Image (cartoon, rainbow, N blue to C red):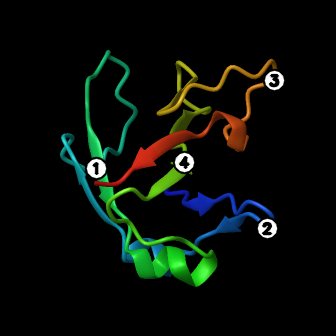
Amino acid sequence: MKLFGAHIVGGKDKKFTGEDFVSVATASSLKGPIDREMVQPTTWTLEYRIPLGLLERHAKIERPGPGVTWRANFYKCADDSSHPHWLTWSPVTNAKPSFHLPKYFGILAFE
């Protein structure tokens, strides 16, 4: 299942559509699709490229460039796996975990 959304500070959260997701380029170290859950420990990578135009349709953003910073977090949820787990790029240490809390977003610094 592919879920793709954005938390718009001062606005409504946005869940992107399947049509939106088509414009996102992805690359994974796993050759897929993965039809069955992999139960053995696995190391893998995932890269993705989100078109700026897609972000600009839903939020006012400052285009990346030298000195520009964004706040963001990226996460993976495996609620329905045999070993439920969650992973975030920027740690969330809230007593009740929530991946949508801007105070835990990390900094993306563009050069």
Q: Distance between the residues labelled 1 and 4?
A: 15 Å
Q: Residue at x 26, y 37 (%)?
A: 45
Where's residue 70, x and y in %? 51, 54
Packing grade of label 2 (10 A; few <14, some 14-19, many >=20) is few
Tell me the element at label 3: loop
Q: Residue at x 28, y 49 (%)?
A: 47
- Which one is earlier in the sequence, the residue at label 2 or at label 3? 2
Q: Distance between the residues labelled 3 and 1?
A: 28 Å
Q: Distance between the residues labelled 4 and 3?
A: 19 Å
Q: What is the quadrant of residue 77 in the picture?
A: top right
Q: Distance between the residues labelled 2 and 3?
A: 21 Å
Q: Which of 18 and 35 is in front in this view?
A: 18
- Which one is earlier in the sequence, the residue at label 4 or at label 2? 2
Tell me the element at label 1: strand
Q: Give the numbered dot on residue 72.
A: 4
Packing grade of label 4 (10 A; few <14, some 14-19, many >=20) is some
Packing grade of label 3 (10 A; few <14, some 14-19, many >=20) is few
Say what amino acid the circle numbered 1 marks.
Glu
Left or right? Give the position of 63 relative to 13.
left
- Which residue bears the numbered disc 3? 96
Q: Residue at x 70, y 44 (%)?
A: 102
Q: Give the numbered dot on residue 12.
A: 2
Q: Give the numbered dot on residue 47.
A: 1
Give the farthest residue toward the front: 67
Q: Distance between the residues labelled 4 and 2?
A: 16 Å
In this rendering, the answer to whether 49 lies above or below 93 is below
Say what amino acid the circle numbered 2 marks.
Lys
Say what amino acid the circle numbered 4 marks.
Ala
Q: Nearer the viewer, residue 92 or 106?
A: 106
Label 1 or label 2, whichever lies nearer to me, is 2
- Which one is earlier in the sequence, the residue at label 1 or at label 2? 2
In this rendering, the answer to whether 47 lies above or below 82 is below
